[in-house]
Structures are given as structure tokens and as C-alpha cells.
Amino acid sequence: MILLATFGSGGDLEPFILMASGLQSRGHRVCILASIDHLERLHASGLPHRVYATPAIIDAMLQDPGLWHERRGLGVIARGLSAILDEIIELICELAGPAPCVALCHPFMLPAAAIARARHPRLRVVGAWLAPSNLRSIHDPLMIGRRRIAPWVPLGWRRALWRFVDRTWIDNHMLPGLNAVRTRRGLAVVDRYFAHLPECADAALGLFPAWFAKPAPDWPRPFMQGAFPLSPGTPATLDDEIEAFLAAGAPPIVFTFGTAMRHAAPLFEAGRDALRAVGRRGMFITRHAAQVPRDLPGDVLWVPCASFASLLPRVAGIVHHGGIGTAAEALRAGIPQLALAFGFDQFDNGLRLRELGVGDMLPADRVDARSLQARLERLLASPVTASACKVAATRLAGSRDGDMFMAAVAAAVDGQAPAGGGPAPLAGQRLPSRADRFDAAPHAQPPCGLQARSRHRPPTS
């Protein structure tokens, strides 16, 4: 049995649906664990699934505007996780049972899986890291919220900075609820949350390619390099309203800020005004009508949802929240993108898009119509951006990435090196047993010279 434990928005869920489908086609028994607000999507997938939480718990998180604050967001998540952590642990224990089992986990699900493993030692835990910044590193590029730490800053200062951030931004929110659960179950307390996450896992899988984010020397080893989890095959058909709008004029600019966002009304208003200023048509995509300006002009269409794989190759560009899934779809479509980052991984993703030359990034709380107009005009007129977008689209155009992605996923859950020329672990000749653990060396060399170091994993980890 392979349990795919996920958390978060629709963008967090989709990679796990893709992985579950691919693993099932390879003969594995699978079950997806997700929050109750995704029940309709899980039914539509046709995959075995179980849900956790209540609508009230999920709504409390999504309705809280602090969720999208770069410092307060983790506090909102911590309150939600504390309310459901015991339920998730029991679900994992129930489904895992005494037989060998693998839990392929979203980063926020790793602590629950590690606690479940204390009861079921034959449970193997694999971390599925959706975005590069999910993996703590002291190496460049280093983003602390919206601030990039200059490459010349010494590594010792970077470690001290992370200790300060952990103490004042993260651990005071994330650890009390987790440690209360661990203490009740007779397990040792955790002293640093983001250091604990990779310690929970027996293997690490990156859901992004090396050309988007080169593995850092202090990422957990062995690290299985994957690819963007983009759906293969023929894209879904667009509905008649979207087709009619696309046929009626020049390619529009898409504005979307994620399935979980309920507080983007000011950004959509700024988008409406910026589109008017640049003389472009637009498309606003959000499930929440309250975010949409009431006085939309005729050349701006609002739709609740659309297939990005089908839509984005036919638009002029996209303005989004910096989510890794949306960014990957825009890279595949070969269009310029402007990330309006709120928090979490979005600032780091936006920086990487900027350094690839395919787009730009602004903090969402500094956006107005004038700043949007200036960035859009620059991106859409730049031949350098257009060329970089073509390069990215070419990299993602073939089927090889999809094959390599599922080869990496299968190898990570099977605990062996992938066959057939797929991506190999970046250290060692095998994936680890439960007795193996990567200890990030303070003065590690780059990945080509790094060897995994092992030591016994305490039973409370």
C-alpha cells in the first residue's frame, strides 16, 4: 500500500493525484489522504481516498487573511494542523496496518507520518517536496520572506539568521501543537520544526527539475531529482464561453491567485485598471465571485476555473500568486509570467522565474495598477523574455520529463535506484533504510562530491 498524504490547496493536491494515478498504473495499491474540501475533486479522480478535518476547520484557515501574510501565515496553518493532527495520525495508522507500507507525504504531513511510524515500524516515509524553498538551505539563493540574502553573506551568518527566523517566526507557532501530540504518545519533543521535517523521511523526492532549482549541498540525501508534475496527454477541452472569448480578439492576459485564495479583490481591481492602461484583454480566474470587480469591462472575462494546460498556450501572459504548479504550467506554455507573491514558497519561486528570464516578481502588498502596468508592459515587450519563455517551453515539450518524473516517484517509494536511465539519487548507491539518516554537514561540498553520512535513527524521531 502507498498512502499519499497531502495538505493545502488544489495546487498542492494535483501532484499527488498525478502520482497516485501513475503508481496505480504500475500495479501499486494507493490511497490519497486529503482535507475534506477536496472531496469533489477526489471523487472525480476515481482514485481510492480518505478525507480528514471538517469544513469548519478548513474554512477557518482559508477565511483568515493572516494566512497570506509572509510572517503570520504559518501561525494560521499551525492552528489548523493542531486541530487535525491526531486524526491524520490515526488515519495513517489505520491504513498502514502491520504490513509494509509507504507514506508519500506533503512536507506538512511528514511529522504525522513519523509519529505513525513509531507505532508501525514497517511504515516507510518519503517526503515529496513540491517547491525548492520547502527544503531548508543556507546556500544561495536564500530568501527570507521577500528579502533575498546577498550571495556574499557568510554561511555562519546565514545559519544564525535561520536560527533567529526559526525562533521568532516559525517554531513558536509550529512546535507547541506538534510537541503536545508527541508528548501524549511518549515521544521526544522537537526543538526546530524545519530541521525536523527532513529527519522524518527515509527518502526525499523533489517535484521540480534541476534546471529550475539545482540541488543544494545541505538538502537531505539521498535526494531523488524529479520533474514538474505536469499532466501528460491531451489537455481538457475548454468550455464554450472561454472558446468564444478567445476567438473574439487578441490573446488575453490571465489573472489568477490560486484555488485557496479568498482575499485577492484588491489585486483583481488593480488588474482591471492595468489592463485598461496597457490596452489588453484579460481573463480573471477565481472560484470566489466576491473577489471579482462588479464593473468588469466587456474585454475582461471572469470564469471560476479553466484547464491551464489547454488555456495558457493561447494567452499573452499570466499574473499569478507564485504557486509552483501555476508557474510550471506557464513555463510549459512558454508565456511571460508575473508573480505577485504573498508568502510561503512564492517569493522564492518568483525569484527563480526572474533569474530564468521568463518573468518577474512583486510582493502582493505593494501592487497597484501603476506597478502592474509597468511590469506587464516591460515583460510583454521584451525579446529577451520571449526567448527565455521559448527555451523553457522547449524543455517541457517532450514526453521524457513525464517518464522521468514517474520513474523518480516509483524509485523513491520502492527504495531503489530507478531503472532505464531515470534520475538517480544524488548521493550513495541506494535509497536509505530506516537506520540511515542524512546529517547536513556544515562545510559540505557541492553535490558531486558529497557522500551521505549515516547514523542510527532514534526510535522517537
Image (cartoon, rainbow, N blue to C red):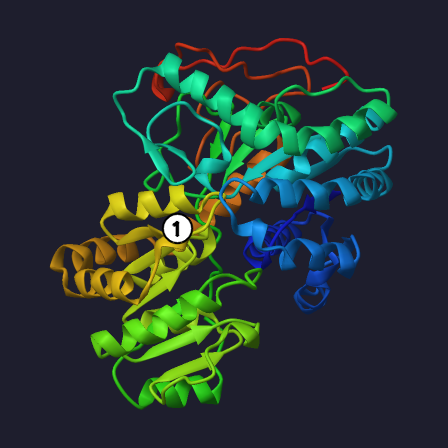
Residue 42 left/right relative to 283: right
Q: Residue furthest left?
A: 383
Name which residue lies at 57% across and 28% down. Answer: 194
Residue 321 left/right relative to 52: left
The local secondary structure at tag 1 comes to: helix
- Nearest the eye: 374 or 142: 374
Name which residue lies at 36% across and 63% down. Answer: 319
Residue 61 left/right relative to 149: right
Q: Residue 368: x, y in percent?
A: 33, 63
- How crowded pointer 1 is (Cα within 10 Å; few <14, some 14-19, many 20+) is rated as few
Query: Residue 160's quadrant in the figure?
Result: top left
Camera sees residue 375: yes
Query: Residue 298's quadrant in the figure?
Result: bottom left
- Badge 1 amino acid: Arg
Q: Residue 383: x, y in percent?
A: 12, 60
Name which residue lies at 39% across and 30% down. Answer: 215
**For residue 329, above or below residue 105:** below
Camera sees residue 395: no
- Nearest the eye: 282 or 216: 282
**For residue 3, above or below residue 430:** below
Provide the residue designation for mark 1: 400
- Quarter holding the C terminus is top right
